[in-house]
């Protein structure tokens, strides 16, 4: 499928997906959602892709779900279409996804960033769940993921008041992993993605799965899950290579085996 609302670029094992609906500040309509998900699924099936970056423009990562597309819908229509359910597919992507956020990440835009594995933010990033001012609340996981990540008090305030959080507050709250100057954001994201892509793909995927499991289960079950994966890693050639390379004082060469 030829994409119309995203740009995709593959460079040295990294897929970059750039949301490209500038006039609407990358508002997430159904076509844009479909294209993002298709690009992610294709990349996930491609053994040469080791990491994915999702980014937007300097002004907006994404200003939310497309208000104009949904405002006339009725409850039966929203229910029948199971509106937003397509986004659940992002949690099935096993390849790491970095959100590189500049400017507005609001509503569905904030929620898309939250669905990525981690967020690198430029100084200009603004996160928010302003749905309350539209007479709705977040619908792509904002009340759930934001609360788990930044805690009840901040998440509640953001969802009830629509207040935006700047990059520094977001970093302090644990929403973003790092802040960069706006002009360095993409380069930082690419370097970070490249680093991840140098490691063993199955091990990276297991590490991602294990961290994500911490959101779904009790501590003791999560630790047990981690330990079982850890044991399983000793059946891989990449574990042998990684440990041997340390002992032999050389760079490891992983073969994803
Ligand atoms: N949906 C549809 N169109 C949008 C949009 C959105 N979420 N956000 C911005 N746009 C459009 C504007 O309508 C405008 O289009 P026109 O030129 O045709 O009028 C264009 O993008 C530029 O926007 P502004 O003129 O408003 O730009 P600004 O710089 O003055 O303001 C902004 C920027 C503060 C981000 C403002 O656009 C805004 O508040 N946007 C809406 C944010 C929002 O409420 N997001 C939540 C959406 S609902 C949701 O996401 C539900 C969910 O949980 C998934």
Image (spheres, rainbow, N blue to C red):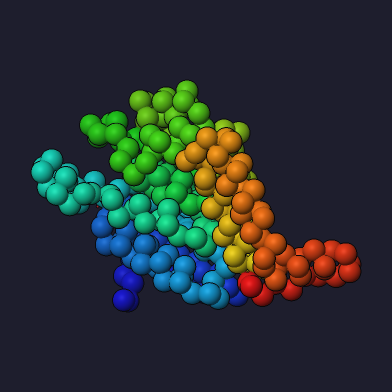
Residue 219 in percent (x, y) is at 57, 35
The answer to whether residue 50 is seen in the rendering is yes
Q: Nearer the viewer, residue 109 or 216?
A: 216
Would residue 151 be found to the left or right of residue 84 on screen? right
Residue 94 in percent (x, y) is at 49, 60
In the depicted structure, whether residue 152 falls above or below residue 11 = above
Quarter of the picture holding the C terminus = bottom right
**Residue drawn at (36%, 62%) of the image:** 37
Residue 232 in percent (x, y) is at 64, 59
**Residue drawn at (36%, 67%) of the image:** 38
The answer to whether residue 104 is seen in the rendering is no
In the depicted structure, whether residue 89 falls above or below residue 124 = below
Quarter of the picture holding the N terminus = bottom left
Residue 255 in percent (x, y) is at 66, 75
Q: Nearer the viewer, residue 74 or 189?
A: 74
Q: Nearer the viewer, residue 192 or 61?
A: 192
**Residue drawn at (26%, 57%) of the image:** 30
Q: Nearer the viewer, residue 198 or 36?
A: 198
Q: Picture quarter containing residue 45?
A: bottom left
**Residue drawn at (50%, 28%) of the image:** 151
């Amino acid at each position: 499928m030829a994409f119309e609302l995203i740009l995709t670029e593959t460079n040295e094992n990294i897929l970059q997906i750039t949301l490209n609906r500038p006039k609407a500040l990358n508002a997430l309509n159904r076509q844009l959602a479909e294209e993002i998900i298709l690009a992610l699924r294709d990349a996930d099936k491609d053994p040469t892709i080791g990491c994915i970056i999702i980014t937007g423009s300097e002004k907006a990562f994404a200003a939310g779900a497309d208000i104009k597309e949904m405002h006339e819908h009725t409850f039966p229509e929203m229910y029948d279409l199971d509106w937003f359910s397509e986004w659940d597919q992002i949690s099935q992507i096993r390849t790491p996804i970095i959100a590189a956020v500049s400017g507005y990440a609001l509503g569905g835009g904030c929620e898309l960033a939250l669905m990525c594995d981690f967020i690198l933010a430029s100084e200009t990033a603004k996160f928010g769940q302003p749905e309350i001012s539209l007479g709705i609340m977040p619908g792509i996981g904002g009340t759930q993921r934001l609360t788990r990540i930044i805690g009840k008090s901040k998440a509640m305030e953001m969802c009830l008041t629509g207040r935006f959080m700047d990059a520094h507050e977001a970093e302090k709250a644990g929403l973003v992993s790092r802040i960069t100057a706006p002009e360095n954001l993409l380069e930082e994201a690419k370097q970070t993605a490249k680093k991840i892509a140098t490691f063993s793909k199955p091990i990276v995927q297991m590490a991602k799965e294990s961290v994500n499991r911490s959101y779904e289960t009790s501590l003791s079950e999560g630790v047990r899950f981690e330990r079982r994966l850890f044991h399983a890693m000793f059946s891989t050639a990449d574990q042998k290579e990684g440990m041997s390379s340390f002992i032999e004082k050389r760079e490891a060469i992983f073969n994803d085996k």
